[in-house]
Image: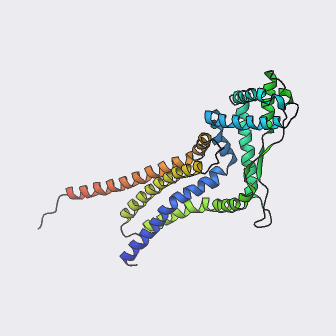
Amino acid sequence: MPPRLRSALSAALIALSCLLVPLGALAAWAAYGLADTGRYVTTMAPLAADPSVRDAVADTVGDGIMREVGHQPDVRPLRSTVGPFVHDAVHSFTQTRTFRLAWDAGNRITHDAVLRALRADDGIAGAPGRPVTVDLATLTSQVKAQLTEDHVPLAGRIPVEHTDVAVLPAHELALLKQGFDILEVAGFWLPVAAVVLAGAGIAVAVHRRRAITATALGTALGGALLGLIVAVGRRLTLADLPADVPHPAAGVVYDALTATLRTTSWLLLGLGLTVALVTWLTRYVRLRSRDRLPSTPDK
């Protein structure tokens, strides 16, 4: 193969490999990070101590209890009196070990429900499904017990209803299932393809040291692009949230879930720059050593 054609082919393979670096990292994170219930629960567990998350949970559960109270004729007249006690009790409950256990259990149940929905085979392509929901009755019953223990008037008559909260709307389920199926395949093959293309690009290169340097710099650029995608994704995600969703809590959750991606972006950036620097230094040292060799006198 002519050297010029080899160089062009090498450049194309290396460029494609570097383009797949951030895409492969995103796909692998979604397929093996978000889709693993154990990792998800472990990632979310520390957020039970975050003030913004506790406030969001307290407001959601407290408002839900007060809506149920409003449906009870015998308790409704005391709604304005009981309301402050309910919210105080919920806030107090979010600081207990019981809440942390309930938080972990709730996240596990929610994650399992979403995964079952995404991996379910409905048998009919495009058929509308049911929304994925979770039940807040467990949290409500624990708050009710706390109010009763604190002797709040009529706390024992607060209804504990099985209130299903939708976490995955039915109209989005079919599209998300298709995307999830693609991610499970891409999460494995995209990183493999990136490595294979990089190796092939270096193998066919005329100047392999330059090809290695280009691959390293492209990997560093891919890591920087991944970090930029995470940052832009955070801004767009928070901007698209409904007005009634607490943005501080949503931001904390987003940062927790994407922590692995941010770490990966820094690792790719650091690894790429390090390899490029080492390659340049070895070439520099080699050239200096060659210049210092004594020349052979002519006979």
Image coordinates for residue 119, horizontal then vertical, percent: 74, 58
**In this rendering, position of residue 177 left or right of residue 280:** right
Return the residue nearer the eye: 178 or 18.
Answer: 178
Q: Is residue 66 above or below residue 294?
A: above
Q: Quadrant of the N terminus?
A: bottom left
Residue placed at 77% from the left, 58% from the top? 120
Residue placed at 44% from the left, 70% from the top? 12
Return the residue nearer the eye: 116 or 232.
Answer: 232
Image coordinates for residue 42, horizontal then vertical, percent: 65, 41
Residue placed at 71% from the left, 42% from the top? 107
Can residue 50 be seen here? The reply is no
Image coordinates for residue 148, horizontal then vertical, percent: 82, 24
**In this rendering, position of residue 19 left or right of residue 125:** left
Q: Quadrant of residue 82?
A: top right
Residue reaching furthest to the left: 299
Return the residue nearer the eye: 75 or 284.
Answer: 75
Image coordinates for residue 71, horizontal then vertical, percent: 84, 38
Residue placed at 64% from the left, 37% from the top? 53
Q: Quadrant of the C terminus?
A: bottom left
Q: Is residue 122 above or below residue 163?
A: below
Q: Quadrant of residue 244?
A: top right
* Label tally: 0
**In this rendering, position of residue 205 left or right of residue 177:** left
